[in-house]
Amino acid sequence: MAKKDPEGLFLQDNIVAQFFINEHEKMQARAVGRVRLFGQWDICADMVGTFNETEDSAKFKMRYWGMAAYLDRGKSPNYNCTEQSIQLIGIVPKGIKTNSVIYDDHWIVATDYHTYALHYSCRVLNEDGTCADSYSFVFSRDPHGLPPEAQRIIRQKQKELCLERQYRVIVHNGFCDSAIYGT
């Protein structure tokens, strides 16, 4: 529905996220969306997220698998994919080794469990523990938008997070439909 972008490149648009319980009875996510690589190639990134539970039901730790793992293995035919180039595409936080297991902290800031969820994640911390680089999504089960009451709640929570007016609507123009729906 809407998102606040982090520093660097990130899923640009045509984003569809699916959360489900896998065959091992663990929470898993799949996110597909358009990414522009090296300023010229548009691709559909297909990422899988695995979760570690926390004691706080509103917080979860998630590790994404997909494009970052692909680039980390050096399979790009035209580029020597270093830690810096992976950081540039906005998937791995700066200073993190891509071959280590890293779970980013994520929070569900607000949800009614039926209509919407406001998600927040901090990718990079300042030395004082405040967030230097964050991203956030407004998830909606209805592709046509949110009811006015949900919009009011989300706007208030965005303001509390100091993210007021930093969101943009996510375009869905069919660019990644074949990656999402297999068409």
Image (spheres, grey):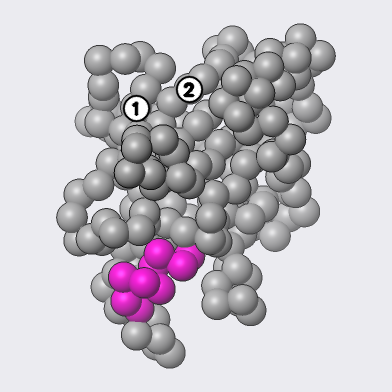
Against 102, residue 45 (above or below) is below
In the picture of the structure, the residue carrying the numbered disc 2 is 108
Residue at 75% in and 49% down: 171
The image shows residue 165 at horizontal and vertical percentages of 74, 35
Which element is circle 2 on? strand
Q: Main secondary structure of the magenta part?
A: helix
Label 1 sits on a secondary structure element that is: strand
The residue pinned by badge 1 equals: 60
Are circles 2 and 1 on residues that touch, CB within 8 Å? yes
Tell me where residue 117 sits by quadrant.
Answer: top right
* Amino acid carrying mark 2 in the image: Ile
Instruction: Place residue 143 in its image quadrant.
Output: top right
Residue 85 on the magenta span = yes
Mark 2 / mark 1, whichever is N-terminal: 1
Give residue 102's position: percent from left, percent from top: 25, 47
Classify 21 as above or below 113: below
What range of the chain is rendered magenta? 81-89
Res 159 seen here: yes
Q: CA distance from mark 2 to mark 1?
A: 8 Å
Q: Is residue 149 left or right of residue 65?
A: right
